[in-house]
Amino acid sequence: MTELTAPKSPISSEDFANEIRELLKYEQGVTPEQATAADVYVAASSAVRRHLMDSWMKTQQDMVNGNTKAVGYLSAEFLMGRQLRNSLLNAGLTDQFYAAVEELGFDAQKVIDAEYEPGLGNGGLGRLAACFIDSLASLGVPAFGYGIQYKYGIFRQEFDENGKQVERPDYWLANEDPWGHIDYGRSQRVNFGGKVVAEDGKRVWKPDWSVRAIPVDYMVPGYASGRVNTLRLWQAKSYDEFDLLEFNKSEYMKAVEPQVKAENISKILYPEDSTQVGKELRLEQQYFFTSASLHDAIRVFYPGEENPDLTTFPNKITFQLNDTHPVIGIPELMRILIDEYGYDWDTAWGITTKTFNYTCHTLLPEALEVWPASLISKLLPRHMEIIEKINDQFLKELAGLTQDQDKIQRMRIVTEGDNKQVRMAYLATYAGSHVNGVAELHSQLLKDVTLRDFSDLYGSKFTNVTNGVTPRRFVKLANPGLSDLITEGLGTDKWLSDLEMLKGLEPLAQDDEFVKKFAKVKHDNKIKFAQFAKDEYNFQLDPSTMFDTMIKRLHEYKRQSLKILEIIATYADIKSGKIKAADLTPRTFIFGAKSAPGYYMAKLTIQLINNVAWVINNDPDVEGKLKIAFPYNYNIRVAQILIPATELDEQISQAGKEASGTSNMKFALNGALTVGTLDGANVEIRARVGAENFFLFGMTVEDVEALYAKGYNPAEYYDSDPRLKAAIDMVAGGTFSNGDRNTYAPLVADWLTKDWFMTLADFTAYHDIQSQIDTLYADQLEWNRKAIINVANSGYFSSDRSIEDYLERIWKTGPLDK
Ligand code: 6GP
């Protein structure tokens, strides 16, 4: 058994301070007196990296020399969050850091705040990848995260004077990034375009342009495992800085064209979430990082070998495809094996199908990537040939499995007709060993609906792995007060590596003294968030009100509209005199959400929330009982302060649409109660924490289906619930747009005539549950007991458990020997 307490580095604070001084001098070229907080941040980060170096090198050696299969997590997104405090924690250097920085005369918080958060992901999918590589390292499993080092991450969100979202470029690399190590020597060439010709009976790809993929390595230290894995993010560079011939002809712009074209590939993260962007550059990105990563893995596991025996490749590493974004890696591995290493088709297919597994993260059909065959042929002509051949082989196989010709046609990887399409999810399902959804309900719906034909014929491939979150970042770092209280309650800090131990807190929910301590921690966290909101956003929040939070990407299926309509309806009740503001339970509604830049309805919803905030927050009739705070540019940093301060968490998506959700897990672990539908992982959270400790409302998946089948008419709901009618009328009548009835007309029309996600149908149920919430909140002791029970029963939602499930059900590997 491994030693589970955090590693205590033998180094003293004085020594750590000296290391920082040395680095300030020899790397930054400044004295401690000249240094800024940013200099100290860079030096301290470099110092931590140095402390991790031996473990990092040893982990790599043990991985290559040992017999434990590694995991390659291929993901277009890794939403890492800030690195310094997490690395200090895992290196066992936190105390030394605080003492050393103080000794050097700096404010530790300023040093920490000098780190600019890298935004290399959109939301849940990218953050999950970050939690997973943390858990892999913490469990001591050898692993690589492989992705792209985008120069610009997810846009920085601002709100203009009308409350509209404005997107600003996020140039996170404007300052030094002490965590990424550029390794020019291990670059890979990635080819594009051209044609395929026949030579000596072989198909030979003659590409017409290439880019250089340069790895930037980030250490991924495990917590209390002594292991440090690698996150390898590829940067695209041109082979030719510029064309001297063109330059000499004074064609300056043309001369730098190849460079611009190459570097565009890793220039920017696509700001889409749960929708497909059928853009050529996106396919270039996908191929760029998967091709480089596969070649890199061969280099790592067969060092220096001219003729490696790649039939052993699936024993060395197993690749997880994080959604469809890296699925082009399947034909790429086939191509590498056949064209570069001379394997025959069947051998190559055997290796490839053993190498890949696929995780699906969505239930929205529009999010399943489909690429025009013409585009793949233009960019990757050899891959299109291989995909066609896989499709032919698949159709033959299907003919032996079923007589149902319609089914066979529905399942085609490459569609027929003039405008052929390649369905990446189908390719991944056919070629991968396993396919998994990310929560029980989601995996079930994948089998029953989204990939039904496949599950009929390839049922044994399908499995579930419910998502999880890392307790190191989202409890220990985000919520030190609660962490200390848990450790006090359990008498050990081993829960950080074994989160099911939280169960031991359950009896303490009946101990009034403990409950009061817990309530105090929550209250202190609320004060802390209020202070942060004041400093950063100039909000005035009252920590004695209920903090009621909804943070997630803005999407119609997530139904931020439901929340804002309920707030508006309450406001309408006050204005019409139906209720007295004084009788309300005071609530602070906190929203955080970015919208995809081209998503019109989502952007209009953001504007509405902001405009409602201005009206309600400033209306004396409300007597300050309702307040809306919408901090712009919600990110991991904000999440780490807001989640611990939240008392009520909103997970109100239409049932059958949210694959899992992961903020729901973070909230439960930090002692918030959930108001939610039976969707995604809500189902499992509720089952664990107990129905009496969860505010359930709304239609189930079956109800939703039945209503669609019957014919859904949202206007009926508008007509039958006077509160809903009043709220929509207020929006339509211009209350939140200075009297202008046009501003929100598209939103109102959508609600009344389409309402794809049945917001109106769930409105009454959502309202009805509010009084239960208020009643319980009035009894703070009871509320907090339930919150503790939520914490105690959320240990299952550790990403360590998710990774253990992947190891057992899919990857069939485990930790390195000690
Ligand atoms: C998200 C899902 O929407 C969310 O429910 C889930 O918790 C998360 O993935 C992690 O599994 N999906 C995406 O972000 C996405 O882009 C294609 O899916």
Image (cartoon, helix red, strand yellow):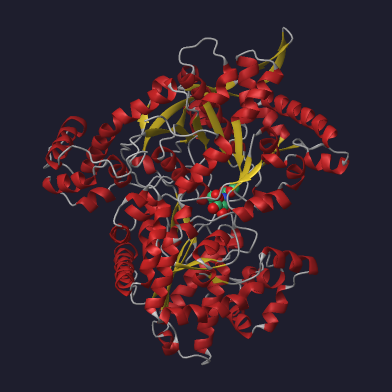
Q: Residue 457's quadrant in the figure?
A: top right
**Is residue 739 visible to the viewer in this orientation of the structure?**
no
User: Where's residue 534, x and y in %?
Assistant: 31, 67
Determine which quarter of the picture holds residue 816. Answer: top left
Left or right of residue 41, residue 795 in this image: right
Q: Nearer the viewer, residue 376 or 368?
A: 368
Using the image as rendered, state which of residue 62 and residue 229 is in the foreground. 62
Image location of residue 431, percent across then percent down = 68, 32
Q: Is residue 433 left or right of residue 304?
A: right
Q: Is residue 761 left or right of residue 488?
A: right
Query: Which quadrant would residue 641 be assigned to in this image?
Result: bottom left
* The N terminus - image quarter: top left
Taking the image as drawn, is residue 434 in sight?
A: yes
Tally of numbered discs: 0
Q: Which residue sits at x=35%, y=42%?
A: 223
Residue at the extreme top of the image, as rendered: 200
Quarter of the rendering occupied by the C terminus: top left
Determine whether 157 is above or below 608 in the image. Answer: above
Task: Identify which residue is drawn at 69% across, 83% down.
Answer: 720
Q: Nearer the viewer, residue 661 or 788?
A: 788
Above or below, 107 against 9 in this view is: below
- Residue 371 image offset from top left, x and y in percent: 68, 38
**Above or below, 92 relative to 716:** above
Q: Position of residue 159 (x, y in %)?
A: 44, 62
